[in-house]
Image: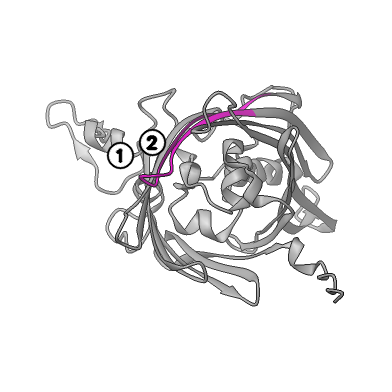
Amino acid sequence: MRRLVLVVLVAISCQTAFAQLGGSYSFAFVNIDPTARTSSLGSSTMADFKKDIGVAYHNPAGLNASMHNHAVLSYNNYLTDINSGFAAYVYHFDSIGTVSGSITYTDYGHFDETDVTGKVIGQFWAQDYVFQLGYGNIWKRDNRFTYGTNVKFLYSVYEKYVATAFAVDFAGAYHDTANKFHASLMLRNLGINAIPYQDEFVDLPLDLQLGFSKKLKHNPLKMTVLMHNLQQFDISYVNVNTRNKNIDLETGEVRNEEVPFGDKVMRHINFGAELVFSENFQLRGGYNHMRRKELAPENVKGAAGFSWGVGLGIKKFTLDYSMVTYFPGVNVSYFTVSKNLNDFQRKRPVNY
């Protein structure tokens, strides 16, 4: 029974936005969105650079001096009774660049432990953790270019089964501030298992990404695009258990669905749009095509794959909320609070 639960937990940890590669990777929980803003924009914020530590968590080339002494706390009411949280802090050094530290956890709750007859003999719990250090800096030869790297330690414990891994991210970005355009190229999750879940070592969810963001000059609209898993063209998953099956009239065998070329391309692309009315008020929306195609039912897809959110500035705190639809009627909520800790410093009195 415990081995069965272990298999289920590993499957849960691997069902992220990259579920089309399910069964090929472990530690896929590293791809869960950390904050409300990143999730509301369809997970497309990799090249959207602002004072957002959530973006820098995924893309260290986004770390910059404007994030100095900023902290963020985020809570994710994930699927079923799964809970996830994120905490991060950024500090800038004039001499070496900008560094960050963060921890992400995913708590799957407590489970009944049973014997072979089904009798409950105890309880156990299951959790995943990502401990990360990041570094970002400006390329001194040209201030339009930045670069960065993340170093991660991944820790997973399901009952008595423990797995660990080490991973790194490498990123570079281009900034055209005059035209409010940014682009970034990144290789994520390059690493190895240190301790596997069982005897077999499984690859980490390697991901080559290219992202763009553009803010219109005389319009509050900002658009973001992320192209992911560029290292592999066909990332589609064909559901062999689909109800709407095609039968070969000659052989009588079931013909599996063929994913069109355009659909295969679209599964690599996430879209986001943000209306930036001011520093204290933003409305957001996003679309994740792969999530919609692979998690929505065949006949009633509803709002699966879509997301939305809002950002508010209240008394020098930034509050963000988002809702992501994975399945019709199944929504995931994010709550994020960020703060510039310099605001807590007392101003020195002026002596006349």
At 64% from the left and 24% from the top, the residue drawn is 202
Main secondary structure type of the part rendered in magenta = strand
Relative depth, front residue between 70 and 258: 70
Indicate the position of residue 64 as horizontal and vertical percent values. 62, 43
Image disc number at residue 274: none
User: Relative to 133, is 237 on the left or the right?
Assistant: left
* Residue type at tag 2: Tyr
Image quadrant where residue 151 sits: top right
Q: Residues within 10 Å of mark 2 (few under 14, many from 20)?
A: some
Q: Is residue 147 above or below residue 322?
A: above
At 53% from the left and 45% from the top, the residue drawn is 16
Distance of mark 1 from mark 2, alpha carbons?
13 Å
Relative depth, front residue between 325 and 152: 152
Question: Nearer the N terminus, badge 1 or badge 2?
Answer: 2
Per the rendered image, the range of residues in magenta is 169-191
Q: Residues within 10 Å of mark 1 (few under 14, many from 20)?
A: few
User: Relative to 157, is 36 on the left or the right?
Assistant: left
Colour approach in the figure: one colour
At 38% from the left and 36% from the top, the residue drawn is 237
Image quadrant where residue 179 sits: top left
Indicate the position of residue 100 as horizontal and vertical percent values. 73, 43
Where's the C terminus, which quadrant? bottom right
Determine which residue is flagged by label 2.
Answer: 237
Relative depth, front residue between 7 and 201: 201
Q: Secondary structure at mark 2?
A: loop
* Residue type at tag 1: Met
Indicate the position of residue 149 as horizontal and vertical percent values. 65, 30
At 65% from the left and 59% from the top, the residue drawn is 82
Determine which residue is flagged by label 1.
Answer: 266
User: Relative to 350, is 291 on the left or the right?
Assistant: left
